[in-house]
Image: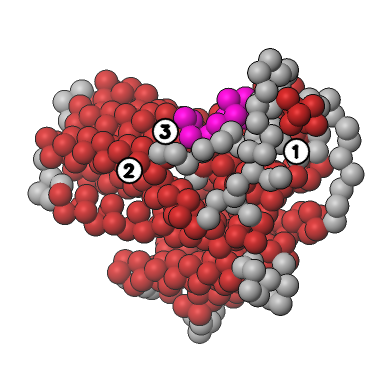
Amino acid sequence: MSTPRFGWFEIVRLGLIQACLGAVVVVTTSTLNRIMVVELALPALLPGLLVAWHYAVQLVRPRMGFGADQGRRCTPWMMGGMLVLGLGGVLAAAAVVWMQTERLHGAVLAWLAFSLIGLGVSACGTSLLTLMAKQVPDDRRAPAATLVWMMMIVGFVITAGVVGKLIDPYSPQVLLKVSAGLSVVTALITAVCLWGLEKHPARHTPAEPLETGAAPMPRTRFKQALREVWSDPKARTFTVFVFMSMLAYNAQDLILEPFAGAVHGLTPGQTTQLSGWHHLGVLVGMLTVAAAGSRWVRGRWGSVQAWMVGGCLASALATVGLCSAALSSHWPLHANVVLLGLANGAFSIAAIATMMRLAGEGGAGREGTRMGLWGAAQALAFGLGGLLGTAASDVAHLLLGEHRSAYAAVFGLQAIMFALSAAVASRLRHPATRPQAPRYDSSSFLKGGSTS
């Protein structure tokens, strides 16, 4: 018999945890960013480096996932990660306050705080995805991924609005109180959502009770587990896909508004609205894939895998459209941006659903390590995406000497990355023969008993 699977109530609880995770992160990456640059008149490079550092720290995700695999439970890692994240958020606020009088000491504390933020996100987010991969049925994976990510976005919006009102007018004391309060509230919500979530170990079947004196699962080293996962051609291919697609996505995201302002003469308010249209398209794309992956229409609108490949190809075409928008003022920019959002949302949710499927295909006991590997690839891509996107724009402007050709060249490079991502993703559609790597005997384990 199979392990009891999560229903929608359990999926919503995971979504609330993801929203709590996003709530703490959005304050540290946006609100504190603004205070450092505006109120403290610090160089914008400082918050940029701190955010990049918190992505770099997330390269520990494979180790976090391996820890969840070895412990056979994901919820302790999720709770621990949320506590570490909350502590990092409070220390980040304290560091910003300290920078008013001691900039060097405050910057050092901020480095420590963003290290904790990266560690907390890695532990909680990786374990959350691992638990979804283990417990969410195949026909619910795309809708579940959409629901969890939509709840995270809602968490962004609510937190930004509430925190914005609470810290206005700004004072250091209010910032510290709000940050501490947010960390406490998110930790309490996470604890409530996790209560009783893992009623049984994820790899234990209720019909086969644990026997006293049964042989435990052999412990393996992290390096051995990582080599085992990397030896799987599908896992390796999907890692490359995650890195390339997220690199293209994040690089495009950071230069879209500057491009609209410099080339099409849109005001800051109009470029913000344009970004809103893009996010609306992302949301519709997510919902479309969620519907396509549901049990009611699955097979009629194409497989989730086809949506992942098609979404990347459509993203490449939409980015080529931005090249045309860079060269012609008459190009329908808003419609192009909505199309780009639709394509981005489609391939991202399809990729998450595929990620959950592939995590389980490698056999029980390696889901967390696989999720950690892919999470690290995404974090590295996000950290490099902003840097490479803006750097490519600067280099193109330097070499070509004017806005239109420079932006067209950058969007052209991103279109190539999206197209290559589609080519890599298409290789996952065919079963690959996985070499037999050393593993524990899962059949003897099941007889004897033992994860945003």
> Which amino acid lies under the numbered mark 1 shown in the image of this protein?
Gly
Q: Percent from the top left, x then y, of residue 194?
A: 42, 40
Point out the residue furthest to the top here: 213
Name the disc covering residue 281, or none: none
CA gap between label 2 and label 1 equals 32 Å
Circle 2 — which element?
Answer: helix
> Contact (CB < 8 A) between labels 1 and 3?
no
Q: Which residue is mark 3?
A: 79
Q: Percent from the top left, x then y, of residue 5?
A: 59, 49
Ranked by sequence position, the earlier of labels 2 and 1 is 2
> Magenta segment, which residues?
68-77
> Which amino acid lies under the numbered mark 2 shown in the image of this protein?
Ile
Q: Determine crowd level at label 1: few under 14, some 14-19, many 20+ residues with C-alpha closer than 10 A.
A: few
Q: Is residue 27 above or below residue 443?
A: below
Q: Which residue is mark 2?
A: 189
CA gap between label 1 and label 3 equals 25 Å
Q: Percent from the top left, x then y, of residue 242?
A: 65, 48
Majority secondary structure of magenta residues: helix
Q: Is residue 252 above or below residue 97?
A: below
Ranked by sequence position, the earlier of labels 2 and 3 is 3
Q: In the picture provided, is 270 more to the left or to the right than 393?
A: left
CA gap between label 2 and label 3 equals 10 Å
Examine the image and state in which quarter residue 318 appears: bottom right
Q: Residue at x 80, y 58 (%)?
A: 429
Q: Which residue is mark 1?
A: 363
For the question of whether residue 307 can be seen, the reply is: yes
Q: Residue at x 86, y 52 (%)?
A: 431
